[in-house]
Image (cartoon, rainbow, N blue to C red):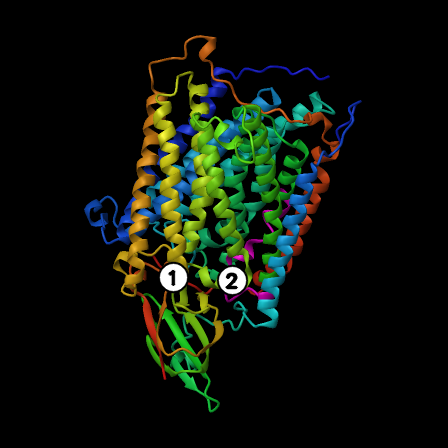
Amino acid sequence: MSEVPGDGSVQTSLHIDPYERNWMRLTVVLLVVFATAVTIAGFALGFQVPSPEERVDPNTVAIGDGPFGEPGLRAYPDGSYDLYVVAQMFSFAPNEVTISAGSEVTFYVTSVDVQHGFKIQNTNVNMQIVPGQVSKLTMTFDEPGTYDFICTEYCGSAHAQMYGTLTVEK
Amino acid sequence: MLTTPTYELTKSEKSFISQHLLFAFIALAIGSLFGPLQAFEFSGVDFYPLLEPVIQSYYQGLTLHGVLNALIFTTFFITGFLTLTTIYGLKRPLKYPLLNRIGFWTMVVGLLMAAVPILLNEASVLYTFYPPLQANVFFYFGLTLVVVGSWIEGYGFIFTWREWRKENPGVRTPLMTFGGLITMVMWQLATLGIAVEILTMLIPWALGLIDGADPQLARTYFWFTGHPLVYFWLLPAYVSWYAMLPKQAGGKLFSDSLARIAFWLFLLLSVPLGFHHQFVDPGVPAGWKYIHAILTYAVFFPSMITAFTVIASLERAGRKRGGKGWLGWIPKLPWNDPSVSAQLLAGILFFFGGIGGITNASYNINLVIHNTAWVSGHFHLTVASASALSFMGISYWLVPYLRGRRLWSRKWAQIQTWLWFVGMLIFSNAMHVLGLLGAPRRTPLGEAPYVPDEWSGHLLRTSIGGAILFVSAYMFVFNIARTWWSKKLLAGPDEEVEIPVAESVHPAQETPAKLDWWTPWLIGTVALILVAYGPQLIEQIGNIDLSSPGFRP
């Protein structure tokens, strides 16, 4: 597929209509605006997606001495928390968590069997939970209330039952 | 001036293409049975218990729906349709008809091989088949053969084109053939991802030759293929929109050059952006996700060219038919031709699909909708509308052409296209709203304990939309079946069905020769894939950890 086809005697040109040229310019402007917006939101305002945190052995991660051996809340003196969650067919451990309003929580979630999802409703916390990996995101909860965290990835027959609740107290 | 040779497809060529379509339509008919069952489940009406022991779970049904409609219907229709655009565009027979037959029967064997474990509930892993969920090994063998068969058919098209090029130096490749070749070459590159995933990881793992899989690396391989898969579905519809629809509407293609530029850009940009499906993955660095987000924006550009060029072509057609004013050309289009109305309505639905797609691509904004019903709503506007409804529209002339029979009912066909449009608007809108409210995708929400009352109206709307779509799908299948086996043969040349071939406003021969030159574009495509994927593939393969044993769902 390498040869350039010969031209013969026909005059060639691109024939781009002025309207279409403007349409393409508008498209580029639009895309630059979008790209700028997500860039500012991501890198200046801190709306970030998960990034590699740690590799673990899914077969032993929940039975060892590590933090997933005893999943749950770790409170720090400054009022922030780490929350370690183990996902497995078809439940989260722990599945009920209570924190106080205004606190910052860093979520560490891993799976001991298949892939799961971890999405806290009405927040931006949304992670794929992959065996062998630790998913991490941080979120501050200012609004008191009950937030369901649900499994958003098909993990087997009772996937629809898999959820837990995070209670934010005043 | 060039003379336009004529070419009439032989009986055996027509029957070869028909065989593709037959498998495609059977897959559509069976797969479409399960769509409404999921939609009804959403409002608490669960038919699945009634289907035991044939279909044992919601997920077996969902696997059938996804695999048959999104993978099998599309792949068989596309390879059949592109066989036609290769032969008819180039006005010559396939160079190696036997090669294409081998490709086709490889796909059939693969389909049957995958179908058995799915029907036995041994492969209810959905069409993403993410490990550590494990299917019967024949499911993986079957999918491999379907892909390999489609490769072989693609090689057949390429050999045929090369032969034509030798016979026709200096002539621009006809646009319909060109678009088909781009589709198949892109597909060859794109499917390397799942080929490596299945052959080096899933099959040895399912056979017990290795103890575990690396689920994160498997996802990266899968989405290397998974996003360009969308373009594999879409580009054949674009072939029709650019190279056929303007003629059907009574006009000409607005710009041959820009059509070709759009196809080249799809070749260049379809593959190196798969991480936008992995924005919430733990094992891919945020920086690479960001780069793929920007590249995903770039692929929006050729779609916008397509929108302009196709709409401009249609506007010219409508004005030629007497349309006046800003929008007066729209009602003048031949809406009474079901093939045209299907494709126009598919285009309108795809407009909404495009807007949603930008949202999906948008890095951090994606966190709001990732893994939610929004995503299923989105791809029902792309594969199930832009592609599937266009393929139905194409079928309304293609089946009468191939079978030499009159379409059983134009009226039914017309109603069918509108029902699809209305049903899809209701269904996909409800799914998008549910996603924004937090409803997970591919989850039987009728039995989920966390569903708030707020969702119930939208869940009901998915059921209503799904029911309308089901009726529409079966009106299509019924109409095609009645046409296929009709006793009424086309009578004489007046009734003969023509393959629509749109001329361009400026003849294709005036398009710069460089736009018919593969080498620079292929080099650019491979280079961009290496840049966008190379470092992460090296990193992830270098750190491969095969420690996840399989789980049978």
Residue drawn at 68 percent across, 48 percent down: A25
What are the residue bounds of the magenta stretch? Answer: B267-287
Rendering quarter of residue B31 = top left
Q: Is residue B285 left or right of residue B27?
A: right
Which residue extends farthest top? Answer: B492
Residue drawn at 47 percent across, 29 percent down: B340
The amino acid type of the residue labelled 1 equals Leu
Q: Do badges 1 and 2 share one subunit? A: yes
For disc 1, the marked residue is B437
Question: Mark 2 and mark 1 in contact (Cβ < 8 Å)?
Answer: no
Quarter of the figure with the N terminus of chain B:
top right
Which residue extends farthest front? Answer: B325
Q: Nearer the viewer, residue B86 or A140?
A: A140
Subunit of label 1: B
Quarter of the figure with the C terminus of chain B:
bottom left
Subunit of label 2: B
Residue A119 percent location from the top left of the image: 41, 67
Whether B522 is drawn above or below A158: the answer is above
Residue B499 percent location from the top left of the image: 52, 21
The amino acid type of the residue labelled 2 equals Ile
> In whole angstroms, how far apart are the C-alphas of marks 1 and 2?
14 Å
Q: Secondary structure at mark 1?
A: helix
Residue A1 percent location from the top left of the image: 69, 34
Picture mark count: 2
Residue B18: tell me if it is visible: yes
For disc 2, the marked residue is B365
Q: Earlier in the sequence, mark 1 or mark 2?
A: 2
Does the magenta segment cover residue B273?
yes
Q: Is residue B203 left or right of residue B519?
A: left
